[in-house]
Amino acid sequence: MESLLKSTAERAVSYLEGLSARPVRPGADAIARLSRLDVPLPDRPTDPAEVIAQLDEIGSPATVATAGSRYFGFVVGGSLPAALAANWLASTWDQNGAIVALSPIAAKLEEVAARWLLDALRLPATCGIGYVTCATQANFSGLAAARHALLARQGWDVEAQGLFGAPPITVVVGDEVHVSVIKALGMLGLGRERVIRVPVDDQGRMRADALPPLDANTIVCIQAGSVNTGAFDPAGAIIRQAKAAGAWVHVDGAFGLWAAAAPERAHLVRGIADADSWATDAHKWLNVPYDSGIVFVREPQHLWAAMAVNAAYLVHGDVREPTHYTPDFSRRARGVEVWAALHSLGRAGLADMIERTCVYASRFADGLRGAGYTVLNDVALNQVLVSFGDAETTRRVIAAIQDDGTCWCGGTVWQEQTAMRISVSSWATTGDDVDRSLEAMIRAAESVMQTA
Ligand SMILES: Cc1ncc(COP(=O)(O)O)c(C=O)c1O
């Protein structure tokens, strides 16, 4: 065990050290070599050192360098040193985070990290928290709590009776709602298409003046940070109307909620703390390893009612049992890395990481604008949308940037415009990375223009 773990740690360190020099996207040869893994189940045992050697030698070159400092696709953070190291130790512990009896340390760290999260994100201190796999699952869990609360108010026990014959619930979303909310609604029996879509403005923000009539049977899903533009729905105006009607407000803040932690960006989340439930990710902007999402519910009893389990073989005391707040039962102790990340950064380090990445996003926008390209969004957060001309040209530039390998950005079609998305979400990105990436982008765009 000892020599295996030490040599694996060495492999991990050299992997990380090599990231800066290799193309962000794995080469075709590395992907072709994956076919070597296509072997039948071995009949006999293999030496663990050989298993790991194969994993590293075939697997490492076929990774996307998302742990490096020049990956700007989707919304992908890296892993902070303390978070990665805590993940190793927690894997070594092999703790099951479901119940206190299975892991006092996991439960304790979740509790401490919960208090720190509520503090950093400026959410009500009374919230119930669940550590889930991702923002999709956090949206699911927050909306499950909403479904419970709205129907319980009408005397309907949805967990016991299901939705057949239940009073109808109306769900209101912005027209640029993230697909994960729609998926969660489908999983909850609330219907992917049974939603009222509210028109959005030129940044993708839900228009508060276009809300339909709301009532106490309505869930309004707002967004803190659009995956395209980074824009925030106007929480104050929407939540005021929702509260007056007795509706529930759920916030999808997969990455945008973290703006609360940076004093210069906190104005973007103004009013959001008045909602009823919130979903976010730690594996995006907090930069912890996958998988790590978090759900917050103002009145914890609703999350508990939606998620709690009861069985004679479970120990029940007056302690908080993590499994009563998540869809999972057995699961890894993912609060460990959240605690480690927050501990290592502190309030100041967290604010700096959020602010720094936003400043780098503006630097990208300024650089590309300066080179004559069109930035489509107001860059108020860490997301940039850039057009290099018509749709075909933009697609060709994106492909050329990905081929070049200095950095990686993906594409999108937003409000009928084809664009490249830049998301600066990694703790590891430096000003030099931004400048090198800008150079590569402009070089790729110019070469595409020359061949047009
Ligand atoms: C606004 C928003 N909501 C939800 C999600 C889904 O996050 P996850 O992939 O962690 O489920 C994303 C992912 O980018 C997002 O940007």
Image (cartoon, rainbow, N blue to C red):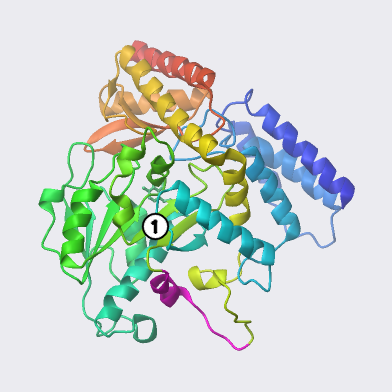
What residue lies at 48% left-to-right and 21% top-to-bottom?
A: 434
Q: Which residues are magenta?
A: 300-312
Pick the residue in front: 116 or 241.
Answer: 116
Q: Type of residue at label 1? A: Pro
Residue 379: % across, % down: 31, 29
Q: Is residue 378 above or below residue 170?
A: above
Q: What secondary structure is the magenta-colored segment mainly?
A: helix
- Crowding near the residue tagged with mark 1, few <14, some 14–19, many ≥20 C-alpha atoms within 10 Å: some
Residue 266: % across, % down: 36, 39
Q: Is residue 334 visible?
A: no
- Numbered disc 1: secondary structure: loop
Residue 261: % across, % down: 44, 41
What residue lies at 37% left-to-right and 49% top-to-bottom?
A: 253
Pick the residue in front: 181 or 293.
Answer: 293
Residue 187: % across, % down: 37, 68
Is-magenta flag for residue 195?
Answer: no
* Left or right position of 248 against 397: left
What residue lies at 46% left-to-right and 53% top-to-bottom?
A: 118
Q: Residue furthest bottom?
A: 312
Q: Quadrant where the C terminus lies?
A: top left
Determine which quarter of the picture holds residue 365.
top left
Is-magenta flag for residue 304?
Answer: yes
So how many labels did they put on this image? 1
* Left or right position of 279 against 248: right
Pick the residue in front: 252 or 107.
Answer: 107
Residue under label 1, please give it.
124
Q: Is residue 275 visible?
A: yes
Q: Is residue 104 above or below residue 367?
A: below
Label 1 C-beta lies within 8 Å of the nearest ligand 1 atom: no
